[in-house]
Image (cartoon, rainbow, N blue to C red):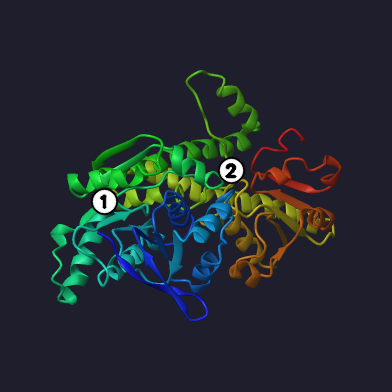
Amino acid sequence: MDFWLESFPRQGNVRFLMRYDISVLGLGYIGLPTSAVFATKGRRVLGVDIVPAVVETINSGKIHIEEPDLDLIVRAAVQSGNLCAATAPQPAETFIIAVPTPFSATLGGRKIPDLTFVEAAARSLAPVIAEDNLVVLESTSPVGTTERVRGWLADELAKRHSAINIEKIHFAHCPERILPGQMIRELISNDRVVGGFTPEAAVRAKALYASFCAAEIFITDARTAEMTKLTENAFRDVNIAFANELSLICEKIGINVWELIRLANRHPRVKILQPGPGVGGHCIAVDPWFIVDAAPEDARVIRVAREVNDSKPKHVIAKIRQAVSQNAASGVRPVVALLGLAFKANVDDLRESPAVEIALELANSDPPLQILAVEPHIHSLPPALVAAKIELSSLDAALERANSVVLLVDHNAFKSIPVEKLSGKKLVDTRGIWSDMG
């Protein structure tokens, strides 16, 4: 089914006709790379985002996130005419939902999924959906969300007295498995799981992703596909929690946890991950709670792992305050340099970052501390950090001014700091880079 329709203005009052094969709702860390890769394979793609500035940036051939090679691919896709962006969906053969799935609240100590964005995206399709269309949910979601997308769209069609038969629309779930900093390569090279609401939907979705995915694509049902993504990230979260718990134990009994893990990992069947200040990002820090929410009485190990990782920033904050108090006791005004704000090394993604949580807690302490944030992958601080009077600083300036230095993210830029620049400063190392400095 082909659709020819008027697109947004590009040059003065001139408007262009655009045929859309795919419409991607949400142009963030998942939606934009996915849109660009489909466009490079000759698909006519409309990217949809509710933020006008994001739409304008993409239509100018630029990107609003940091990701290697993505800017080149987006520019080429826009210039070819295969990719454009708008603030509302238009008719297409396939719709891909790639919007955020954050938390809405905490209930009984567990975090509750917020599907507001997914619901809004599903309902927004009602004016443009057609029978035989394929709707793919890419957003990582609680089990059963694909069914709810179908239900929300059916409800919206009913409100509009539409003659479209929901039974003739195909629904599937195809979660991404990509790592920031390697998104384009992993989109193409990683295996994918496609779960259909019906077998026909799964086959249709597999054919869609086979247009660019060079790896294997496995077919299952939608609920299993949803649980697969959650399980992958919960597995990693549990392993990180083990490492973080080890770090707490080792600190208490006087053992270097970094050396301990290095030695234990010499066993051929042991692979302990590295501890840190907590767990961030929109996947590992979020997805396990979706499993806990689905079966709170049974997800005991997963819940405890989340609690261990969620509590780690508080332990780091206590260590920083101890270092700061030593400076204050000696009559030195505490100035703290926090090295890294991203949730992982060498990316600009601050979502669910424990480093941001630590920075805010320290800045809002009584009395407030002077905080210098060093994050080489961003150009400005988020509003919450600005409001807390945290200063974005270069690495050299921060090391010159600070008397306490805290390593929160192991960016490459921090791995070659000369030892003499750290001399005489209180050090808190959450990543093991300075573990041999004593």
Which disc number belongs to residue 18?
none
Q: Is 145 situated left or right of 192 in this image? A: left
In-front residue for pair 242/198? 198
Is disc 2 surrounded by few (<14), some (14 to 19) or many (20+) residues within 10 Å? Answer: many
Task: Give the residue at x 53% y 52%.
Answer: 73
What residue does disc 2 label? Answer: 276
Residue at the bottom extreme, as displayed: 13
Counting residues from the start of the chain, the first of labels 1 and 2 encountered is 1
Q: What element carries label 1?
A: strand
Displayed quadrant of residue 328: bottom right
Query: 207 or 244, which lies in front?
Result: 207
Indicate which label's residue lies in the foreground, 1 or 2. Answer: 1
- Could you tell me residue 306's position as x and y percent? 44, 47
Q: Residue furthest top?
A: 268
Can residue 268 be seen here? yes
Q: Residue 218 versus residue 147: which sits nearer the camera?
A: 218
What residue did someone put label 1 on? 172
Determine whether 126 is above or below 296 in the image.
Answer: below
Q: What secondary structure is marked by label 2?
A: loop
Above/below status of 374 relative to 163:
above
Residue at the image position 22 percent from the left and 49 percent from the top? 201
Residue 157 lies, in percent from the top left, at 19, 71
Q: Residue, x 18% and y 76% (percent of image)? A: 159
- For the image, the number of numbered tags is 2
Res 144 seen here: no
- Amino acid at circle 2: Gly
Q: CA gap, disc 1 to disc 2?
A: 36 Å
Q: In which quarter of the image is the C terminus?
A: top right
Q: Is residue 296 above or below residue 272?
A: below
